[in-house]
Image (spheres, rainbow, N blue to C red):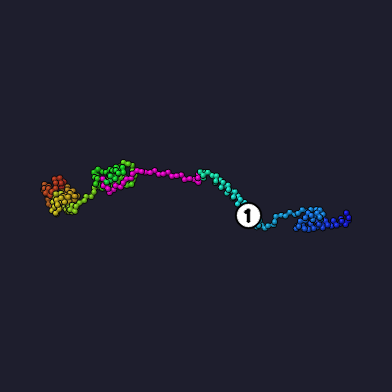
Amino acid sequence: MTAGSTAGATSTAASGTAASTTSAPTTAVSATDASAAGGAIAAAPRRGFPKLKWWQWGLIALAALVLISMIANGINGGRADDDAAGDDPATVAEAVGEVPAEEPEPIDDREEIPGLVGLTVGEARAALEAVGFVIATPAGTADDWVVLTQTLSEGRKADAGAEVLVTAEAPAPVYTLAQQNAIGKAQSYLDFSGFSRTGLIDQLEYEGYSTEDATFGADNAGADWNAEAAEKAASYLEFTSFSRQGLYDQLAYEGFTDAEIQFGLAAVGY
């Protein structure tokens, strides 16, 4: 090798090295060029993360968290669906809590007590016997009497053969107009003075009533004939003095019976 060639090579290498050093930050030297320049291959510089601002890094981190959360929810949802699909229906029902069926109430098929108030005793008896019950009444109650009360109320259920006690009163009598007037006239006479039964009948006949209506009026005027005899005896003594026998005879004349006269005399002190 000549001195000129050595100097040229050294100059070329120095130039290549300077060029490589100067352009390193921006341009990599190719292997061919380096070989041509002197045979040495320079390694390419490593590029780092790009420089970002803080708020850009924050957005990236937030996006990463959202993505991770979506993936986790998807995995958990799939597991829950698998668990639900595999549950036993009976187990699910037990977990929810089934309401037990209510027991049916017992049916009371006994007969009801019918309403009896306002019926006659005979009608009440028939109504009770038709549904298997028995009527009970106080002694002396007639079938035509009207029921006033009943011990077992209407609509109440009772066992077959149950006894229902009723109270009743005699029906109001139905009078003719003549009978009603005879009663009224007899009562007005009794309010005015003492009368015997026969004396009151005679007075009503004198008023024009028939013997039948006059007798009916006297018997239904509500008189106490003993009290009437006592009242008549007292009225005579207020008018004048009488011996016991004289007062007895006067009361007998008025139509009082012996028993009524004795009661009247005793009442005035004889």
Quarter of the image for the N terminus: give it. bottom right
- Is 131 situated left or right of 26 in this image? left
The percent coordinates of residue 2 (x first, y second) are 88, 55
**Residue located at (84% from left, 57% from top):** 11
Is residue 226 visible to the viewer in this orientation of the structure?
Answer: yes
Residue 121: where, in percent of width, then height? 26, 46
What is the x, y in percent for residue 49? 70, 55
Helix, strand or loop status at disc 1: helix
Q: Residue at x 16, y 51 (%)?
A: 213
Camera-nearest residue between 6 and 239:
6
Any magenta on residue 8? no
Residue marked by disc 1:
63
How far across and how far down the image is residue 245, in percent? 11, 47
The magenta region covers: 93-122
| 85 or 139: nearer the viewer | 85
Asked whether 97 falls inside the magenta stretch, the response is yes
Front-most of residues 55 and 71: 71
Quadrant of res 27:
bottom right
Please report the residue visible at 20 percent of the width from the left and 51 percent of the height from the top: 175
